[in-house]
Amino acid sequence: MKRGYSFVLMLSLLLVICPFPVSADSGTIGGDSGWYVIHCNVYGSNVYMDDKFVGTVQMGTLTILASTTGTPYKTIRVQKYGYSTFVDSITQVPGQGESVDIYATLNQLPVTTQTSVGGDMGWYVVHSNIDGAHVQFDGSDKGDITQGVVYVPVYSTGTPYQGFTVEKEGFTTYKGTISSVPGKGESIDLYATLNPVATTIATPATPDTVGGDTGYYAVHSNVDGADVSFDNDVKGQIYKGNLVVQVYVTGTPYKTFAVYKAGYIPFTGTIDQYPKKGETIDLNATLSPVASGTTAVPATTQKSPLPVVPGFLSIVFVAYVIALGSRK
């Protein structure tokens, strides 16, 4: 009886000291997930992804869990009353255990538009890449672009505007349509990208063929608003994924092109083809965001092989004790 009690006690101690191996990552949360980290300059801004509310920015950031195998998000919208709304496309999907940073900057609306007489006013916020460009709504002057924007107050119950233009000498005029009217206290963002007018290249050998001997480069990029230059000569900005650059087929051939924007790694490429008259040559540039500071994310836990050896030895030892007891 005493021998049997000792055997049970020894077996219990072995099981406590040398437990059988258990998968160390069985409790890992989100093994196939990553994160979006939304940075915003306005505390309390609401964040929507694909028009779905996902949270409010606190202390400058909001972290959103994202499945690496699910349907990826396409758009992000960040807004708060009294500020212009931020809208952008989402072009990256985080890998397993990775994070993707998205930066949203909200501009405060002028006090005059927030406290308009009558209280039934909204406003249009016209964004453009060219300061000093003049803005018109249905032919009516609305001001000039300053620090990238101009604010246009409107009565929500007034006659709706149909279209707007943004123009400046030396740039192609942008014309856009207005399809909605802001409600009371709301804002609607309108965007206009102006590209420099292609300059005429004086070619003594072909003075009578201006405009007749031109070809084109179509520069495609994943980042709207990125600047494009040919041999360090700025040609314009990417709008809706591309920029068309007109060139004279008899001019000096370009050798290189670059596409760049703040927050992204600049792209440079070589130009080894020159368009013929009326021909278009495609150039592609994919920009990658500049890596930001290290973002703390939960470390993935992997299985540890160490408990296997003690577990195996415990089994051998128990078998030995049983065999020894049977002999006596």
Image (cartoon, helix red, strand yellow):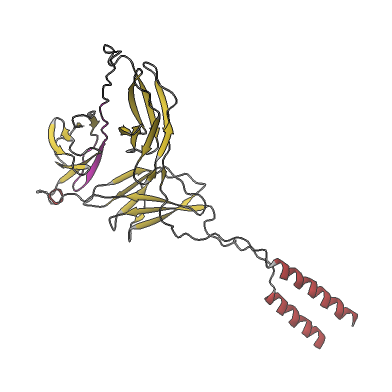
Q: Nearer the viewer, residue 38 or 160?
A: 38
Above or below, 127 relative to 251: below
Q: Does 194 lie within the magenta span? A: yes
Give residue 23's position: percent from left, percent from top: 64, 62
Q: What is the quadrant of residue 308 in the picture?
A: bottom right
Give the overall secondary structure of the magenta segment: loop
> Residue 313 lies in what quarter of the image?
bottom right
Which of the pair 160/132 is nearer the observer?
132
Picture coordinates of residue 175 (x, y %)? Answer: 23, 29
Q: What stretch is highlighted in magenta?
A: 179-197
Q: Quadrant of the N terminus?
A: bottom right
Does 174 lie within the magenta span?
A: no
**Residue 9, image x, y percentages:** 74, 82
Q: How many labels does the image show?
A: 0
Q: Which residue lies furthest to the top in this view?
A: 208
Residue 238 in view of the camera: no
Furthest toward the bottom, the residue is 2
Q: Where is residue 88 in the image (x, y as percent from the top left)?
A: 34, 43
Q: Farthest residue toward the left?
A: 117
Residue sticking out furthest to the front: 204
Residue 37 visible in the shown view: yes
Say left or right for 284 vs 200. Answer: right
Residue drawn 75% across and 68% down? 312
Q: Which sits in the foreground, 159 or 12?
A: 12
Q: Quadrant of the C terminus?
A: bottom right
> 186 above or below 226?
below
> In the visual, does 247 lie left or right of 296?
left
